[in-house]
Amino acid sequence: MATQEQVADSEQFAPPLSDQRDAVANQEAEAWRDVSVGAQVLSYAMLALMTVLLMFPFVWMVSTALRPSGYDFDTSLIPRPYIALENFGLAWNYPDTMFPQYTINSVIIAVVGTCLSVVLNTLSGFAFSKFSFRGRNVLFLLVIATMMIPFQVIMIPVYVTLATLGLVNTYWGVILPSTASPFGIFLMRQFIQSIPNELLDAARIDGTSELGIFTWIVVPLAMPAISVFAILHFVFLWNDYLIPLLVMNRQEMYTLQLGIKGFMTEYQAKWNFLMAMTLVSLIPTVAVFLFFQKYFVRGIAMTGLKG
């Protein structure tokens, strides 16, 4: 058995209990830091792998667009025997095509269709979120239910309706079928619901009309959702192939996507020209996204309410 002097000596030289706890805490923190570093390395590695997988089709498209004619089926990522930048000019001026006119048609359809759809769907979302009327919830559920119906199911009735109205081979024949978007109504309704009713009531007390409330209060505060929907709808209209194929049967009314399809014939495909024009068709969608980016930040900043 230890004597009282030995116990006293051990207690004298033993570190305080608080220091022991700090040492244990530091060891645990270092262990968690090691685990955290390992998890970060694994996360970055997985992100890098996913980036490579997602970017590979785009890299392959650029490589194919820069391959000289006669080397369309080369499997190397670096075009050989040289980088054929002239493919863009040759594809733009390809015989029996009208790519300048195709581009004009696509711009008109995408810009007009996006502006009209943004206004209509924002107004619908405002009505569904801030107005009380009989059957509002049932009607909203019916609108949402239409999202489950593929366009292929209703494209024949849509075509018959457009033909009856004389809208075949017109811009409106492509714009109108997708103007009222169930997704757009749902998105705008959900976002506008977050706007406090007190703001709208205060504007009504000041004598502002409902259209003025919508224009000067709802639209600025809903700009983040409007920007998101505008980008998505513009990209949809710009890349849409089925509705223009259904409505347009005259070459001068083709959109850019229908024109690009002309490089694929029954017996051969001009893959380098097709990919070159596909790259050109990506420019407007990227430009629209970059343009609307600032509205994301501005819209979020404007939604801050000061007490």
Image: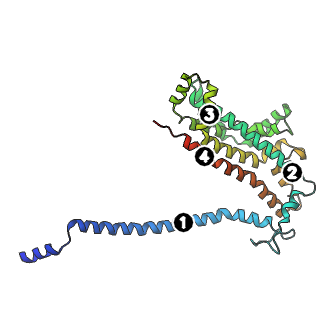
Which mark lies nearer to you, 2 or 4? 4
Identify the element where label 3 is drawn. helix
Q: Amino acid at mark 1?
A: Tyr
Q: CA distance from mark 3 to mark 2?
A: 37 Å
Q: Three-letter amino acid code at disc 3?
A: Gly
Q: Residues within 10 Å of mark 4 (few under 14, many from 20)?
A: some
The mark nearer the N terminus, 4 or 1, is 1
The residue type indicated by label 2 comes to Pro
Percent coordinates x, y for residue 260 in the rendering: 83, 54
Label 3 neighbourhood size at 10 Å, few (<14), some (14-19), many (20+)? Answer: many
Q: Amino acid at mark 4?
A: Phe
* Residue 208 position by quadrant: top right
Relative to 56, 277 lies left or right: right
Where does the image place residue 112, in percent across and percent down from the top left? 76, 39
Residue receiving disc 4: 296
The residue wearing badge 1 is 44
The alpha-carbon separation of the residues under discs 4 and 3 comes to: 19 Å
- Identity of the residue furthest to the right in this view: 96
Mark 1 or mark 2: whose residue is earlier in sequence: 1
Instruction: Using the rendered image of the protein, determine whether residue 45 is visible from the camera's viewpoint.
Output: yes
**Which is in the foreground here, disc 1 or disc 2?**
2
How many numbered marks appear? 4
Between disc 4 and disc 3, the foreground one is 4
Q: Residue at x 33, y 68 (%)?
A: 26
Q: Quadrant of the N terminus?
A: bottom left
* Distance CA(mark 4)–CA(mark 1): 27 Å
Q: Quadrant of the C terminus?
A: top left
Residue 33 screen position, x and y as percent:
41, 67
Disc 3 target residue? 125
Q: Is residue 84 left or right of residue 44?
A: right
> What's the image's color scheme?
rainbow
